Image (spheres, rainbow, N blue to C red):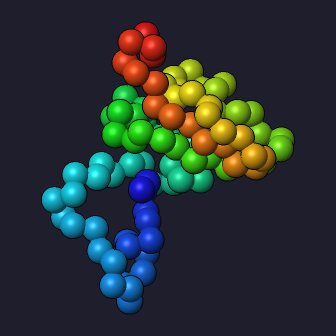
Amino acid sequence: MISFSFPELFWNIPVRVHENAGIPRSNVGAEWQVRLFDYDELGNFYGHMLVRMRADQRGVESLAKFPYERIYSNPPWELYRHLAEEAVE
């Protein structure tokens, strides 16, 4: 769940996020622009990331800080798993 999600977008569905769920709020627009995602603040919350990239875009590995490893790729989709703290440093 990032920035906005299914339960937040639609008032008329019977799915809600519990206010005490502990899901951090990411920067608005980060779901469309990965550079807006704050890895220092939110990176350790997510165990996996599913990323969709256009063929003309650089991969997320080109970001200065991306503590994830690609575990599956089927363009335009890529699945990443969070690295252990030891592997990030």
Left or right of 33: which side holds 15?
left
Residue 44 horizontal/vertical position (percent): 35, 33
**Residue found at x 62% / y 46%:** 51
* 69 vs 8: above or below: above
Left or right of 60: which side holds 48?
left
Q: Residue furthest front?
A: 71
Which corner quadrant holds the N terminus? bottom left
Residue 62 horizontal/vertical position (percent): 66, 25
**Residue found at x 28% / y 68%:** 17
Residue 88 visible from this viewpoint: yes
**Residue found at x 45% / y 14%:** 87
Q: Residue furthest left?
A: 20
Residue 33 visible from this viewpoint: no
Left or right of 57: which side holds 41?
left
Q: Residue furthest right?
A: 56
Which corner quadrant holds the C terminus? top left
- The tally of labels here is 0
- The residue nearer to you, when weighing 1 against 65, is 1
Residue 19 horizontal/vertical position (percent): 19, 64
**Residue found at x 33% / y 84%:** 14
- The residue nearer to you, when weighing 38 against 84, is 84
* 13 vs 43: above or below: below
- Picture quarter containing residue 4? bottom left
